[in-house]
Amino acid sequence: MPAPQTVVVGAGLGGLTAGALLLKAGHRITVLEAHVYPGGCAGTFYHKKFRFDAGATLAGGFAPGGPHAQVAEKLGLEWPIHPVDPAWIVHLPDGRSVTQWTDPQQWQAERQAAFPDTESFWQRLEMLADIAWDVSSRPFPWPPESLHDIYTLARAVRPKTLHTLPYLHRMISSLMPPDNPLFRAFVDAQLLISAQTTSEQANALYGSAALDLPRRGVNHVKGGIGALADTLVNWIRQHGGEVLFRQKVTEIEMQNGRAKAICTNKGLYLEADNILANLTPWALRDLLGKNAPAKLAREVRQRQATWGAFTLYLGIESARLPTKTAGHHQIIVDAERPLGEGNSVFVSISDSNDSTRAPTGQQAVTLSTHTAVAPWWQLRHNDKAAYHARREAYAERLLAAAETALPGLRNAITLCLPGTPVTFEFFTRRPSGMVGGFPQKSILQARGPSTSIENIWLVGDSIFPGQSTAGVTLGGMRVANLVERISRAGRPLRLWQPNVSTNNLYGGPNGNVF
């Protein structure tokens, strides 16, 4: 019997991870990518001798037991990374800064100095985070979509996991001390880039793990974060799989309720036993057209648009930057105003020792803020002059914020590229330029990989546990296990199709996005 033919639509990290694992399991793998480089929102693009991270700039999950470490062990590969400490520095509106040290003792001293009345919050958060990260080190197919998933979840549970039950319906805000707006803004800013929502709505379990990311380790990726995707592409090709670029999938051919084949803009016709869609639900619905299942069509009608991002890509003269500065900074402009839209800005600076990222004597810098996508598209369609004026205003807003962390930044700029949701849609083909996963408000409302078509599965930042390179890798591992089990044993008995919550659903960028 021939090996199953599995086609991955989109060369994001989630899809590449799933594809590589299935290739190792004996599948024939073809990855189709519309762009000229892999990685999607965790890709790195080249412009005028600079290599800019298009989306994600923070890389975690490489510690022993972490998702990237598990994949490296399974595949026998080595990631081009080295750890950094501190993870990043948060700049508060009152002029103080809080350094997110990876070292536990340094971090405890730092937080006690900055927020002396919050120690009980951090201790409880670390307890929950330890449990969450421990569970994630084992197969954890959440939300469950079969009897086998429930059995696997039961095996992942340990006695200490039961301590988290009271927190299933609690939000991070319920753990925080009251009447401390500056501390709340500090926590909210971290959650916005890691859970895509703030403390009033972020689930306590997921939010604890997200807030604990600096202690789990942040890494510099040589050549830009897109080198993670490059590493997987190279592994797939070296082991007999295919990764094809400039192949935009234009149609999924259906037969008897199943996906039969893939068609691309280059005339490629490829039959498939399984399709992994490294896409958002909106993009998959558009691709399926009239063949989109009613449930998928209803889901995308009911969901609110996710976040977009406004981004500046800067080339800067290294000599004009402050010496020995951290590689990542987060600036909160005003603790009383909603975050995003330039009121919270994330800054990432390429490693000065990484000569692949910029010309000699220069570095690549990315500035990013969450932004709603609709206003940009309304202006783009109806008033292009106003669109450009808004773009210039946002660029000024981000530069002003970044100057508080990096004095003299403006005078160091040799190249400046702005990016809006319109830009992001053009280069990543994500509908409306929406980026990031859905907000992690309740793990009971999480989205799984099912699409209601039995041989098509979603993978990427739309399925639990959502955005971040670690999150999409965990999702990719789940989907690979699911597809391989089905290929060997046939379709398992399904218990239900989980309902999709539509209450205030929105997502956002992972730190920085194009």
Image (spheres, rainbow, N blue to C red):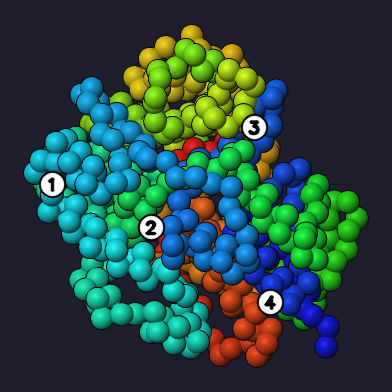
C-alpha separation, residue under disc 1 versus residue under disc 4: 48 Å
Say which residue appears at 84% left-offset and 71% top-offset.
271
Left or right of 426? Residue 83 is: left
Residue position for label 3: 356
Say which residue appears at 68% left-offset and 39% top-offset.
427
Q: Reading the chain from its start, which is encountered first: label 3 or label 4?
A: 4
Q: Mark 1 touching mark 3, by CB under 8 A?
A: no
Residue position for label 2: 440
Q: Could you tell me residue 168's position as x and y percent?
A: 27, 69
Disc 3 crowd rating (10 Å Cα; few below 14, some 14-19, many 20+) is some
Disc 2 crowd rating (10 Å Cα; few below 14, some 14-19, many 20+) is many
Residue position for label 4: 25
Q: Mark 1 touching mark 4, by CB under 8 A?
A: no
Say which residue appears at 61% left-offset and 72% top-offset.
480
C-alpha separation, residue under disc 1 versus residue under disc 2: 23 Å
Q: Reading the chain from its start, which is encountered first: label 1 or label 2?
A: 1
